[in-house]
Amino acid sequence: MKQYDLVIFDWDGTLMDSVSKIVVCMQQTSRQLSIDVPSEQAVRDIIGLSMNKALSVLFPDADETIRDRMVDVYREQYLTLNQTPSPLFSGAEQLLIDLKAREHQLAVATGKARAGLDRVLSATGLGHHFVASRCADEAKSKPHPEMLQQLLAQLDVPAHRAVMIGDSIHDMNMAKRAGVDGIGVSYGAHSRDKLASSSPIAIVDRPQQLFEVIVNQ
């Protein structure tokens, strides 16, 4: 008998190895607009937040006009100009296949906008694995629990029968606020120590370990 009916994944840094690309694109956006360039760690710390919230944290003195311009420049960097690879993590697709074989429902809760998530789901061919998803332009930004609350309501799953998997403290805090178990992955935006500060039920170092943790709870 399985512990979780619903397994919810973050995307960037959890299923897709895109943290480095996000960092480079955000730094290049700053250079292009002659704004102070944030450190790699500063950018890592906002991964998972909605774009508007991320920019407000990274550039608190920037006005709305500048932030709107930054969104446009960042999008051009990410989609067109920057060639940093962002493959799926090794073992990620097989993990989804194995969990579905055990009749877990799978979902996504991401800081990406809907257009961005739809694009990567199509490009990777993973879209058919997921029964539902929520994006940063459809609910309040992580760590607010609204994304998870909406998914639980849509799929009629009680909080104690769901688990959230993510690479950032924002994911773990969102899970805690929603009453959902959290599992951290140490290979994305945040370190094992930082993830541990939110008391996830487990922290793993590679996707292949997630299956064992989920099925043995």
Image: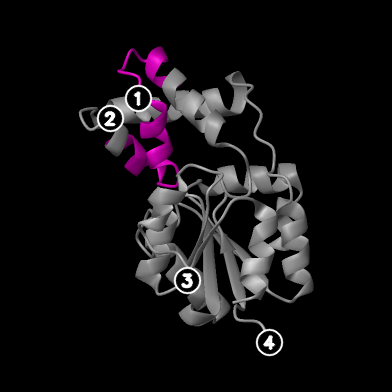
CB under 8 Å between discs 1 and 2? yes
* Amino acid type, residue under disc 4 in the picture: Met
Q: Earlier in the sequence, mark 4 or mark 3?
A: 4
Q: Amino acid at mark 1?
A: Pro
Under mark 3, the amino acid is Asp
Return the residue at label 3.
181
Quarter placement of the N terminus? bottom right
User: Would you say the residues marked 4 and 2 are in contact, meaning their CB atoms lie under 8 Å apart?
Assistant: no
Residue 50, percent from left and from top: 40, 46
In this picture, which residue range is highlighted in magenta? 29-56
Q: Which secondary structure, mark 2?
A: loop
- Mark 3 lies on a secondary structure that is strand
Q: CA distance from mark 4 to mark 3?
A: 17 Å
Q: Where 123 sits versus 141, above or below?
A: above
Query: Closer to the observer: label 1 or label 3?
Result: 3
Alpha-carbon distance for marks 1 and 4? 47 Å
Which residue is disc 2 drawn over? 59
The nearer-to-camera label among 3 and 2 is 3
Residue type beneath disc 2? Phe
> How many residues crowd mark 1 within 10 Å: few (<14), some (14–19), many (20+)?
some
Sequence order check: which comes first, mark 3 or mark 2? 2
Q: Main secondary structure of the magenta part?
A: helix
Q: Which mark is residue 38?
A: 1
| Disc marking residue 1 | 4
